């Protein structure tokens, strides 16, 4: 697997997040607390394909009663680590009026070819969820146990001849 993507990712009109290959998870140790099956937002790439940042919103599972019932997770200008496909930095998480900050680590690697035969990016984002500050998920903040927030997703090229514009 190449350490830096070879394809140009400079034009976002020809890229899409593959929602069928995406999943958000909230866990405490090895115990899965919540699956976050959908999200909306943006993932920012540098022209070479490395991860620069993201702004994502996850609708929360019922019976969460906060307004709005979504977790917003953002990070901008993520610096590269020693390896080109890895990044880490600060992220912010917002849940209703509560806001907290957490270190985020990410892996953004190019996969040589998929079903279409064209390379695509596989992205994994992970942060320790400041559940006490956010008061969610309750299973962790009542016990003062750390939780992890993870997102697995893929960015694929649009089929030839189409764009998102």
Image: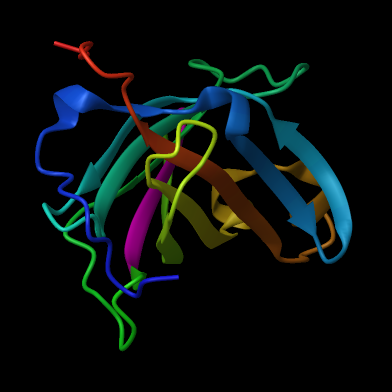
For the N terminus, the image quarter is: bottom left
For the view shown, which residue lies furthest in the bottom direction? 82
Seen in the picture, residue 156 relative to 142 is either above or below; the reply is above
Q: Residue at x 31, y 22 (%)?
A: 158
Q: Position of residue 133 (x, y in %)?
A: 55, 53
Q: Nearer the viewer, residue 27 or 120?
A: 120
Residue 102 visible to the viewer? no
Q: Residue at x 48, y 16 (%)?
A: 68
Total of numbered circles in the picture? 0
Q: Quadrant of residue 118?
A: top left
Seen in the picture, residue 74 relative to 145 is either above or below; the reply is above
Residue 117 visible to the viewer? yes
For the C terminus, the image quarter is: top left
Q: Main secondary structure of the magenta part?
A: strand
Q: Is 98 part of what is drawn in magenta?
A: no
Q: Residue at x 60, y 52 (%)?
A: 150
Q: Nearer the viewer, residue 76 or 71?
A: 76
For the view shown, which residue lies furthest in the right direction? 31
Seen in the picture, residue 120 relative to 31 is either above or below; the reply is above
In the drawing, does residue 115 fall left or right of residue 29? left
Q: Position of residue 163 (x, y in %)?
A: 20, 14
Seen in the picture, residue 157 relative to 151 is either above or below; the reply is above
Q: Position of residue 117 (x, y in %)?
A: 44, 39
Provide the residue span drawn in magenta: 89-96
Q: Nearer the viewer, residue 152 or 92?
A: 152
Colour scheme of the rendered structure: rainbow
Q: Nearer the viewer, residue 135 or 32?
A: 32
In the drawing, does residue 85 fall left or right of residue 134? left
Q: Position of residue 104 (x, y in %)?
A: 43, 64
In the drawing, does residue 86 fall left or right of residue 30? left
């Amino acid at each position: 697997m190449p350490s830096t993507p070879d394809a140009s990712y400079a034009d976002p009109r020809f890229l899409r997040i593959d929602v069928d290959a995406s999943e958000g998870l909230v866990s405490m140790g090895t115990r899965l607390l919540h699956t976050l099956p959908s999200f909306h937002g943006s993932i920012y790439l540098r022209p070479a394909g490395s991860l620069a940042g993201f702004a994502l919103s996850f609708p929360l599972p019922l019976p969460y009663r906060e307004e709005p019932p979504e977790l917003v997770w953002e990070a901008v200008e993520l610096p590269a680590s020693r390896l080109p496909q890895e990044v880490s930095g600060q992220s912010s998480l917002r849940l209703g009026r509560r806001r907290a900050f957490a270190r985020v680590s990410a892996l953004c690697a190019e996969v040589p070819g998929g079903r279409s035969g064209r390379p695509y990016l596989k992205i994994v984002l992970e942060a320790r969820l400041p559940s006490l500050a956010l008061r969610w998920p309750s299973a962790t903040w009542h016990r003062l146990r750390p939780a992890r927030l993870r997102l697995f997703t893929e960015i694929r090229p649009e089929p030839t001849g189409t764009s998102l514009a």
